[in-house]
């Protein structure tokens, strides 16, 4: 009892010291960051990208004259573009936004993005600059289109004032949430200058390529290990790793589909799938894999993963809890999983289990990524991934750190597979050696038996010859005795009277 109490007390003390140390670290980092930012203020730069969400004018109906700059919309309804009135039925309507003069001349050559589940036509200062889908008052003839990742160039006229007009309808996806858990129908427009729009387009293409490559790589690993499990069912760690790698890869692929698709139907399917892979599947399979390879019994970590998965499924199916609580839970649970893996791996390294250092390397890289991102956020107040050598190094580090756990797990399984094969080969060699020894011993026994057989045959022949000699001597003696008796009888017959 006393020893158990001492262990519990040490654990509690270790947890308290660790928590206080982490708190002091991030508090000091935040304080130093604030002092640094005050002593090195830097040059304030205006935002290069502005989300136009509020101060829109809205009117139901359709009139081409409503796109004109000089049109009087003072009696129109004031709305947010991404949250229309509850009685909106999805039919065609017009939005108008009066662009403030403070954005010019920088935004004269502009670029914009639009995100919605309906259809729209966009006008800058009365000139039609883009169309996304087909706007209609009939659901059958409407063609919904989501241009979310497409930057379109547009030019304002030199003379003010400036007006953005959007003709919009949403009859097929009226009750769909648009983005970030904000209720639809409606749209989100972002305005920027054309140079920044070009930069963002390049970054989006790069991100899509990386998502595709990483996702395909992880799904390929998942298929390979699934085949290994199907051919050898006893190795269940291959199954757990296959599920983990597949769910991890689908995060990248779903992100790629979500950012590149223009179909609202596909997007509405991909987003719940992405939430399901992020939370319930990936963390549960990760912890089960760790417990499996170290032959440990399931503890509270597995049941916490099941609970987190239940909350994730409830969010996807029923929309609760809210998105902020959902992602807060994901961040907390990611840290919890890393803690469980780190503790288990450290114990395995101390016990000198084969391959434990391989997993330890992957966990360490991922932990460094978390510390790097969180520390940068506390010190700088944000994490900036700009264009340049530093950002390239940072992006490379992030990609490597994200893949460190699945790659280290795959390397561990490969190492374990090779270790098992080496052990089997060693056992096979031992069996072959023993078989050779047994065969040699069997041959030696056979030679001994053959020698003994020959010796016995010789002894039998010699004994038989001796017996035959004795028989011959006895027969000769018997004949001599018989002859003597016969001779004596004849003498008796001659001498004695009849």
Image (spheres, rainbow, N blue to C red):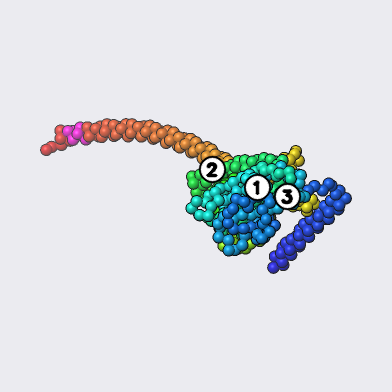
Q: CA distance from mark 3 to mark 1?
A: 11 Å
Residue 472, quarter of the rendered image: top left
Q: Residue at x 62, y 45 (%)?
A: 128
Q: Residue at x 42, y 33 (%)?
A: 451
Q: CA distance from mark 2 to mark 1?
A: 57 Å
Q: Nearer the viewer, mark 2 or mark 3?
A: 3
Q: Which residue in the structure is indicated by mark 3?
A: 161
Tell me, for residue 302, which label it has, or none. Answer: none
| Element assignment for label 3 | loop
Q: Does 45 sit left or right of 274 as displayed?
A: right
Q: CA distance from mark 2 to mark 3?
A: 62 Å
Label 2 with label 1: CB-CB less than 8 Å: no
Q: Which residues are magenta?
A: 484-491
Q: Which residue in the structure is indicated by mark 1?
A: 126
- How many numbered marks appear? 3
- Residue 340: give x, y in percent of width and height: 66, 55
For the stretch drawn in magenta, the main secondary structure is helix
Q: Residue furthest bottom?
A: 1
* Front residue of 268 and 434: 268
Q: Which residue in the structure is indicated by mark 2?
A: 224
For the residue carrying disc 2, how many other residues have a C-alpha within 10 Å: few (<14), some (14-19), or many (20+)?
A: few
Q: Does 42 sit left or right of 106 as displayed?
A: right
């Amino acid at each position: 009892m006393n020893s158990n109490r001492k262990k519990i007390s040490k654990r509690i003390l270790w947890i308290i010291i660790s928590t206080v140390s982490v708190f002091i670290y991030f508090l000091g980092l935040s304080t130093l960051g604030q002092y640094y930012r005050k002593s090195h203020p830097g040059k304030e730069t205006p935002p290069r990208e502005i989300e136009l969400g509020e101060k829109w004018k809205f009117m139901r109906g359709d009139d081409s004259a409503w796109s004109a700059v000089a049109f009087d919309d003072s009696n129109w309804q004031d709305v947010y573009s991404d949250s229309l009135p509850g009685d909106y039925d999805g039919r065609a309507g017009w939005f108008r936004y009066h662009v403030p003069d403070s954005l010019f001349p920088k935004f004269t050559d502009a670029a914009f993005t639009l995100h919605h589940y309906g259809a729209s036509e966009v006008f800058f200062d009365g000139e039609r600059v883009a169309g996304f889908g087909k706007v209609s008052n009939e659901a059958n003839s409407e063609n919904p289109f989501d241009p979310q990742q497409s930057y379109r160039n547009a030019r304002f006229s030199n003379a003010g004032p400036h007006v953005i007009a959007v003709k919009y309808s949403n009859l097929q996806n009226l009750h769909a949430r648009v983005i970030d858990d904000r209720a639809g129908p409606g749209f989100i427009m972002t305005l920027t200058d054309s140079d920044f729009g070009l930069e963002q387009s390049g970054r989006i293409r790069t991100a899509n390529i990386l998502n595709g490559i990483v996702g395909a790589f992880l799904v390929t690993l998942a298929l390979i290990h699934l085949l290994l499990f199907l051919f050898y069912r006893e190795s269940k760690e291959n199954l757990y790793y296959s599920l983990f790698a597949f769910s991890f890869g689908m995060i990248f692929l779903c992100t790629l589909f979500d950012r590149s698709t223009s179909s609202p139907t596909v997007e509405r399917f991909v987003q719940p799938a992405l939430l399901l892979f992020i939370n319930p599947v990936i963390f549960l399979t990760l912890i089960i894999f760790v417990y499996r390879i170290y032959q440990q019994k399931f503890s509270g970590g597995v049941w916490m993963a099941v609970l987190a998965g239940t909350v994730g499924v409830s969010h996807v199916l029923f929309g609760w809890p809210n998105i902020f609580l959902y992602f807060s839970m994901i961040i907390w649970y990611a840290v919890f999983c890393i803690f469980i893996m780190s503790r288990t791996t450290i114990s395995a390294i101390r016990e000198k289990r084969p391959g434990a250092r391989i997993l330890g390397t992957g966990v360490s890289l991922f932990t460094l990524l978390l510390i790097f991102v969180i520390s940068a956020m506390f010190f700088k107040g944000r994490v900036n991934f700009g264009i340049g050598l530093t950002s390239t190094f940072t992006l490379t580090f992030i990609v490597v750190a994200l893949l460190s756990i699945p790659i280290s797990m795959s390397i561990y399984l490969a190492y374990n597979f090779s270790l098992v094969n080496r052990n089997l080969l060693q056992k096979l060699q031992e069996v072959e050696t023993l078989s050779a020894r047994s065969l040699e011993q069997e041959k030696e026994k056979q030679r001994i038996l053959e020698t003994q057989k020959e010796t016995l045959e010789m002894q039998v022949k010699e004994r038989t010859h001796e017996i035959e000699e004795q028989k011959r001597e006895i027969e000769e003696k018997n004949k001599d005795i018989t002859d003597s008796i016969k001779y004596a009888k004849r003498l008796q017959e001659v001498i004695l009277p009849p």
